[in-house]
Image (spheres, grey):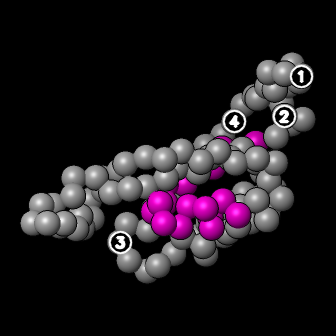
Amino acid sequence: MKRIEAVVQSEVSRKVVRAVRETGVGGVTLIESLGQGAGYRPEIAGKQIEFNSTDVILTVVNDSQVDAVISAIMDTAYTGKKGDGKIFISNVEESYDISTKEKSVNTI
């Protein structure tokens, strides 16, 4: 199993979630966040914005779903400008469903 964590601009996050769900994943978590990368930060009313409004999208998928989910995120979040976001992939050794006490693959 893999954990996919995508940091995207808030304006596109709900579209990205829909695209990820359309790949057949079991569930998605959306976390509203503020971020600061190395890229451009705009000025509003003469002051540079310290943090950009970003969202973090999390999902855990079977290894066979990773490429489809990455493509869905990339295609939906892409504007061609700096600050479109990042995707991080990590291994998930085990997972548990608290309500059913099931372990591993059955929980995603």
Residue at image coords 33%, 57%: 52
Mark 1 and mark 2 in contact? Answer it, CB < 8 Å: yes
Q: Which residue is mark 2?
A: 107
Task: Work out how far the residue at label 1 is from the one at label 2, CA to CA, in angstroms.
Answer: 9 Å
10 Å crowding of disc 1: few (<14), some (14-19), many (20+): few
Image: 9 above or below 32: below
Crowdedness of circle 4 by 10 Å Cα count: few (<14), some, many (20+)?
A: some
**C-alpha gap between disc 2 and disc 4:** 12 Å
| Residue visible at 45% across and 62% down in the picture | 9
Vertical order, 99 against 72 (above or below): above
Q: Nearer the viewer, mark 3 or mark 4?
A: 3
First of labels 4, 1 by sequence position: 4
Q: Earlier in the sequence, mark 3 or mark 1?
A: 3
CA distance separating discs 2 and 3 = 36 Å
User: Is residue 96 visible to the viewer in this orientation of the structure?
Assistant: yes
User: Mark 3 or 1, which is nearer the eye?
Assistant: 1
Separation of residues labelled 4 and 1 (CA atoms):
19 Å
Query: Circle 2 — which element?
Result: helix
Dot 2 amino acid type: Thr
Q: Give coordinates of residue 102: x percent, y percent.
A: 89, 24
Q: Is residue 69 in the magenta section?
A: no
Residue 9 shown in magenta: yes
Residue corresponding to mark 1: 100
Answer with left or right where residue 20 lies relative to residue 57. Answer: right
Element under label 1? loop
Q: Report the span colored magenta.
A: 1-18
Split into 4 quadrants, where in the image is the N terminus? top right
Q: Which residue is mark 4?
A: 92
**Mark 3 to mark 4 CA distance (whole Å):** 30 Å
Which quarter of the picture shows residue 100? top right
Q: Residues within 10 Å of mark 2 (few under 14, many from 20)?
A: some
